[in-house]
Structures are given as C-alpha cells and as structure tokens.
C-alpha cells in the first residue's frame, strides 16, 4: 500500500472570488457582514452582496420609532455620501417609515 502525501489545507483566502460569492448567498446577513470583515479581498467580493437589498421596515412603539428615524436619517446620509456603497443598493424598503 502506498502512503499518501499530506495535503496542505486550503484556506478561505485562497478560494476564487466566484466561489466566495456563491458561498455568500447562503449566509445570513449578520454572518455575511462578519465574513466581509475577514480581509480586504473578502470585503471587495462580499460587500455588494451586503447592500443588494436594504430593508428598513419597522413596527415599534412611537419612542423607538423616533430613535430609529434619527438612525435612518444618519444611515441614509452616510449612504448618500458614499457613492461606491450606494451604487450597490438595488432595493430600499421604507414602507413602514411614513
């Protein structure tokens, strides 16, 4: 019987960007956000997946709604000031923000 040579482990950073993008579509949004923080290359591949759909719907008591509206205004201002990130947004849901 012939001994097999040990294989070096494949790291995630050595995966092709297309494979990372395929993996990303199966991750929950929170995991995807953390995954994009691993490296600059991950961020460049995954960031467009993070901002394809932004759902800002809210069903909450009035005090919480006021705080969330202020946070929404800040978020939209930041998004408006960042052309690269805003170009990634494909859908923005504001139905419950009246």
Image (spheres, helix red, strand yellow):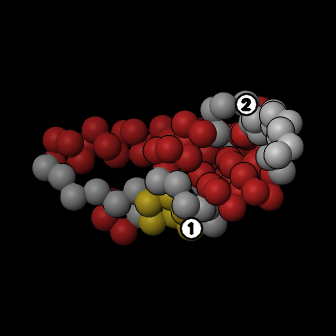
Location of mark 2 (residue): 39
Depth check: 13 or 86 in front? 13
Provide residue 25's location: percent of width, then percent of height: 60, 61
Query: On the picture, is 22 further left or further right than 74?
Result: right
Give the image location of residue 78, x and y in percent: 59, 39
Q: Which residue is mark 1?
A: 91
Circle nearer the viewer, 1 or 2: 2
Q: Nearer the viewer, residue 77 or 58?
A: 58
Horizontally, is 3 left or right of 58 in the view?
right
Residue lying at 20% horizontally and 42% vertically, measured from the top left: 64
Residue appearing at x 56%, y 47% in the figure? 32
- Residue 25 is tagged as none
Residue 48: name its quadrant.
bottom right
- Left or right of 65? Residue 70 is right
Per the image, label 1 sits on a secondary structure element best described as strand
Tell me whether the residue at label 1 lies in contact with that at label 2, contact meaning CB atoms closer than 8 angstroms. Answer: no
């Amino acid at each position: 019987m012939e001994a097999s040579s040990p294989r070096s482990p494949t790291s995630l950073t050595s995966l092709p960007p297309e494979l990372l993008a395929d993996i990303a579509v199966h991750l929950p949004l929170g995991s995807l956000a953390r995954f994009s923080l691993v490296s600059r290359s991950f961020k460049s591949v995954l960031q467009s997946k993070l901002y394809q759909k932004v759902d800002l719907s809210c069903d909450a008591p009035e005090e919480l709604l006021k705080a969330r509206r202020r946070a929404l205004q800040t978020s939209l201002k930041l998004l408006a000031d960042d052309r690269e990130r805003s170009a990634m947004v494909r859908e923005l849901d504001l139905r419950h923000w009246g």
